[in-house]
Image (tube, helix red, strand yellow):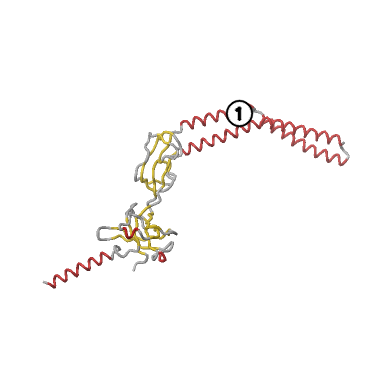
Amino acid sequence: MKSKLMKYILLMLIVLWASCNNGNGNSDAYGNFETNEVMVSSQASGQIIQLNLREGLTLSAGEIVGCIDTNALHLKKQQLFAMMQGSQSRNPNIGAQIEVLKQQKSVQEKEKNRIAGLVKEGAATQKNLDDITGAIQVIDKQIESLQTQFEPVSSDLKSLNVQVDQVNDQIQKSLIASPINGVVLDKYSEMGEVTAPGRPLFKIAPLDTMILRVFVSGDQLPKVKLAQTVTVFVDKNEKENTKLSGTVSWISPTAEFTPKIIQTKEERVNLVYAVKVLVVNDGSLKIGMPGEIKFSEK
């Protein structure tokens, strides 16, 4: 009877030892999974006339999911175009007149070069050369006069073009788009609500790769290196863990007190270093889920 009891006790000890060595008791560091969350805020003011969003929706970078009312902006754009047409109609022929004078100047300059050659050969007089030079100078004065008249119109058109560009930029910012590839975590606004610049619309985060933030002691720090591959354990059930591979992406340069999420007060007063480990998510990893790492699996 005692023999059977001893065998039973021995069997239970073996089971307990195996479970303790399945990543539950020999891990080097502990922490929780997180990700780089992005808060998407409104860049325009007005009523949200479209918002195709729900929590858990997967979005691609640049994907448009909604729009803020742009009716007032389109009306302002039409007004600016009308003002541009009005400015151009005040002096419709100035540009054409300048072009005609430039062509005349080009012809006269060719004639001047020809006469200058004849003067050298004695086949033309200096007066002929002076007359053609004077004619070119007159054309230059006419062009200068027309350009002076055209400058206010040109300045007005440049100013109006800048205003049109500003309106186009505001219209573009009225489109609600995802800045990254990721999954919508939270939704803060609904279609029909009035929003303003800086007001949060939704939160999105990439979940294809998760970050396990763990804390190591000063004694463990020499074992940790950037780009180092480590073994990651997450809970599979009450007795088993799932083993994954991770890569160290960041090591804190300064020590801090152990975060309050650590259970015992004795551990919370210790100074530790934060370490981030990138882990490819197969769909089982969630934000806030606990995890453990081993620097080298024996």
Q: Seen from this angle, which residue lies furthest right?
A: 122
Q: Where is residue 285 in the image (x, y as percent from the top left)?
A: 33, 54
Task: Specify the farthest residue to the left.
Answer: 1
Quarter of the rendering containing residue 99: top right
Corner quadrant of residue 251: bottom left
Q: Which residue is at the front of the view, 86 or 229?
A: 229
Q: Is residue 104 left or right of residue 45?
A: right
Amino acid type for the residue under numbered disc 1 = Ser
Residue at 49% x, 37% y is 170
Q: Where is residue 289 in the image (x, y as percent from the top left)?
A: 32, 54
Residue that numbered label 1 is attached to = 87
> Residue at position x 60%, y 28% from top?
87
In this view, the residue in front, 234 or 168, is: 234
Q: In this view, does 250 lie above or below 195?
A: below
Label 1, residues with CA under 10 Å away: few <14, some 14-19, many ≥20: some
Rendered image quadrant of residue 98: top right
Quarter of the rendering occupied by the C terminus:
bottom left
163 versus 33 height, above or below: above
Between residue 83 and residue 292, name the one nearer to us: 292
**Quick one: quadrant of the N terminus?**
bottom left
Q: Say if 127 sits above or below 292 in the image.
A: above
Question: At which x and y percent is residue 279?
Answer: 37, 57
In the rendered structure, the answer to whether residue 288 lies left or right of residue 79 reads: left
Number of residue marks: 1
Q: Residue 74 in the image: x percent, y percent?
A: 49, 31
Mark 1 element type: helix
Q: Nearer the viewer, residue 31 or 190?
A: 31
